[in-house]
Image: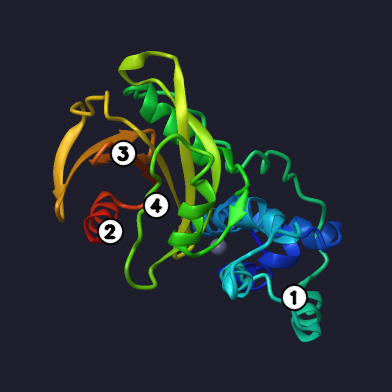
Amino acid sequence: MSRIDCDDFKKFIDPYLDGEFDDRERADFDTHLAECAACRRHYEQQAWFLRSVRPALQRPTRLPPGARERLEASLRVAQRPARARRMARRLMIPLPALAVAGVVGLGVMPLAGFKPAPMVDDAVEQHCADFPVEFPSPEVAEVDTWFQDKVPFHMQAPAFPGDKVTLLGGRLSRIGGGEAGPSTRPAAYLMYSVGERKMTVLVFDGSDLKIANGEALRAGNKQVHLHDANGYQVALYQRGPLVYAVTSDLPQRDLLNLIGESL
Ligand SMILES: [Zn+2]
């Protein structure tokens, strides 16, 4: 039995992720993590956020005014008050050494099973890879400008109205597969957070492609082809010459709603 509950876990996830706990404290958290699927999910989300966005913020990147503040707010890695640390200490009760080996490798999703188009596989692989963003910014226009001289197409990142979805930034990428086979083409990789979840979008010139396979659904004014790839949804849609491959583990309906509202 774990000595901490879900509230404790969430409250102290930052020091846990940052490796600030001693062995016994860590063992308590490891145990809870092993026993609790909800906290495992929360942990994975927090972990990708830290791995993917924080390194970019720590580089001396020239960010648009206010962007750093907004991104750091999204990161929720604000300085933890000393009081919180003291509470963490009090929570920790001596515990015999626990066999917690095996609670490693979280976040590594084997891409087995259903094999749709190679492009869909590639999108899921890139989604899971936690590549850090090269250009952190919550502003669509800024990110489009950054890509301008880096990709051979006129970049238009999807904009999501409201505050449910936050753009975290972009990086230069490639996408393979499609009817062109294993060859790859330049793509813009965008990372968003949807609440605590990650959503990634690959944008590329697909004027020569047919994306007709997969279930075709209506989302707003878009025709979306949805692929379920090992627990991830990959939604493909076209806008002019550009193809958008949106990957997340959001429920299908939520993902379609977001895409339907996007500009
Ligand atoms: Zn829990």
For ligand 1, give the image quadrant. bottom right
Instruction: Indicate left or right for 148 with 75 as reference.
Output: left
Query: Can you tell which of label 1 and label 4 is closer to the viewer?
Result: 4
Identify the residue position indicated by label 4 in the image: 157
Vertical side of 181 occupied by 36: above or below:
below
Give the image location of residue 81, x and y in percent: 76, 83
Q: Give the percent coordinates (x, y) of residue 168.
A: 53, 59
Mark 2 crowdedness (10 Å alpha carbons): few <14, some 14-19, many ≥20: few
Between discs 2 and 1, the one toward the N terminus: 1
Q: Could you say which is closer to the camera, residue 138 or residue 16?
A: 138
- Residue in the picture at 31% in, 38% down: 242
Residue neighbourhood size for the residue with mark 4, other residues' Cα within 10 Å, grouped as few (<14), some (14–19), many (≥20): many
Residue indicated by mark 1: 91
Give yes or no for contact between labels 3 and 2 (Cβ–Cβ under 8 Å).
no
Query: Distance between the Cα atoms at labels 2 and 1?
Result: 47 Å
Spot occupied by residue 86 in the image (x, y as percentages of width and height): 81, 81
Of the numbered discs 1 and 4, the one sitting upstream in the chain is 1
Label 2 vs label 4: CA separation?
Answer: 9 Å
Instruction: Indicate which disc, 2 or 4, sits on the residue closer to the N terminus.
Output: 4
Query: Which residue is denoted by mark 3 in the rendering?
Result: 242
- Numbered label attached to residue 263: 2
Q: Amino acid at mark 3?
A: Leu
Amino acid type indicated by mark 4:
Ala
Pointer 1 residue Cβ closer than 8 Å to ligand 1: no
Name above or below for residue 203 compared with residue 146. Answer: above
Residue farthest right in this picture: 22
Q: Amino acid at mark 2?
A: Leu
Q: Quadrant of the C terminus?
A: bottom left
> Which residue sits at x=65%, y=57%?
50
Instruction: Give SS at disc 4.
Output: loop
Secondary structure at badge 1 equals: helix
